[in-house]
Image (cartoon, helix red, strand yellow):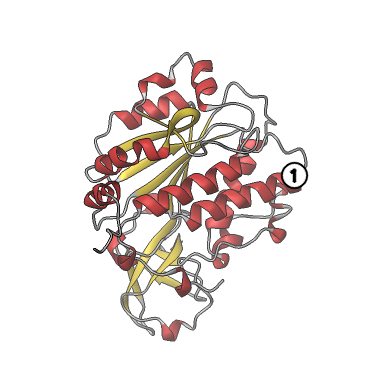
Amino acid sequence: MAMPTTTPFAHQIASFRSSAPVNFWVAIPDSSISDQQAKRDKSIKIAQFARAFSIFRVKRVYIYHDKTSEINKNDARILKTILGYLDTPQYLRRRLYPITPDLEFAGILHPIKAPHHKKFEDIKSIKPGDARVGVVTRHKGVMHVDVGLGTMIPCENISPSEEGKKVNVKFMSRHPKPRVIKASADDMNNSYWGYEILQVPSLHGLLKETKSKNNIEIMITSRNGSPFKKVECELLGTLNLVRNLLVVFGAPKRSVEQILSGEGQSIEHYKYRVNMFPFQGTETVRLEEAIFGSLAILNNNLLLDINKTESPSQINH
């Protein structure tokens, strides 16, 4: 008699899977690099964060203030600057990031090579439907975007208030009269198009605002939480209805519980408090290790229809 190839639990997990991928959002403290003393080491650690966020397609990164940790006053700025710099296509970096001490070691950091990091192209090869990242600029009184093609491209649906900001655009016509409009998510053809970075004054404030929305679930990483396997099935069921998951990480020397406690709040108010590394063989799991490991586990279990996204082999390594 043939033996079953899957367990009943596996069938239960499979029953929750849908074709719509989960959007990962991540929250990290502004003390994330407080365990590093030298700027070079801080920069390398931030680059590890950026690589993890991009590998696992994180859409949004929150940097929350950690009032429980002693941090260098420049750390929050360096963290945001390098995360933003590495997510920005190379052809826009000089325009958006002037020379600054915060980027002193940018040259040694590994590039991301995400789909929105386009290589140089001849503008004549651009065709309608192509998408690129650009910076909004005003040229002869008209709103244009610089998309790294050697000329400013007029854009129809951008307001003057967006001048100097990064935008995603889609080409509507070819050279010699190229024209673009702001792109929608559908225009990216399910490709990963980088992360946005938002700074918030407190973790409790972020979680309170997040809980008030109907389309987001919160998962707090905690050594004292339930092992992921125990909540996996229920979490999958929740994410069939809620397509955004905010994953919250603590600081190098403070857990999420301790950070919330320092804000006069309790972790007990949150349903999904999850231990992603049960039976860990080391005394501690470093923040960069926790981010890589947690997102890898979630990616394997929660990103559901890989046929609708590009294969990693389509990106040059």
Quickly name the residue at label 1. Answer: 39
Q: Is residue 227 left or right of residue 12?
A: right
Residue 181 can be seen in this image: no
Of the 4 image quadrants, the one containing the N terminus is bottom left
Residue at the far front in the pictured view: 1
Look at 34% across and 41% down and name the residue there: 232
Residue at the far top in the pictured view: 264
Q: Nearer the viewer, residue 306 or 1?
A: 1
The quarter holding residue 107 reads: bottom right
Vertically, is 258 above or below 25?
Answer: above
Q: Nearer the viewer, residue 173 or 306?
A: 306
Residue 134 can be seen in this image: yes
The quarter holding residue 129 reads: bottom left
Q: Position of residue 140 (x, y in %)?
A: 43, 66
Q: Is residue 267 left or right of residue 32?
A: left
- Residue type (three-letter) at the residue carrying disc 1: Lys
Mark 1 residue element: helix
Q: Position of residue 77 (x, y in %)?
A: 61, 39
Look at 70% across and 35% down and name the residue there: 35
Q: Residues within 10 Å of mark 1 (few under 14, many from 20)?
A: some
Q: Is residue 288 left or right of residue 153?
A: right
Q: Position of residue 90 (x, y in %)?
A: 57, 66
Q: Nearer the viewer, residue 93 or 300?
A: 300
Q: Position of residue 3 (x, y in %)?
A: 28, 60
Vertically, is 130 above or below 240?
Answer: below
Q: Nearer the viewer, residue 148 or 159?
A: 148
Look at 46% across and 68% down and name the residue there: 312
Of the 4 image quadrants, the one containing the C terminus is bottom right
Vertically, is 198 above or below 296?
Answer: above
The quarter holding residue 208 reads: top left
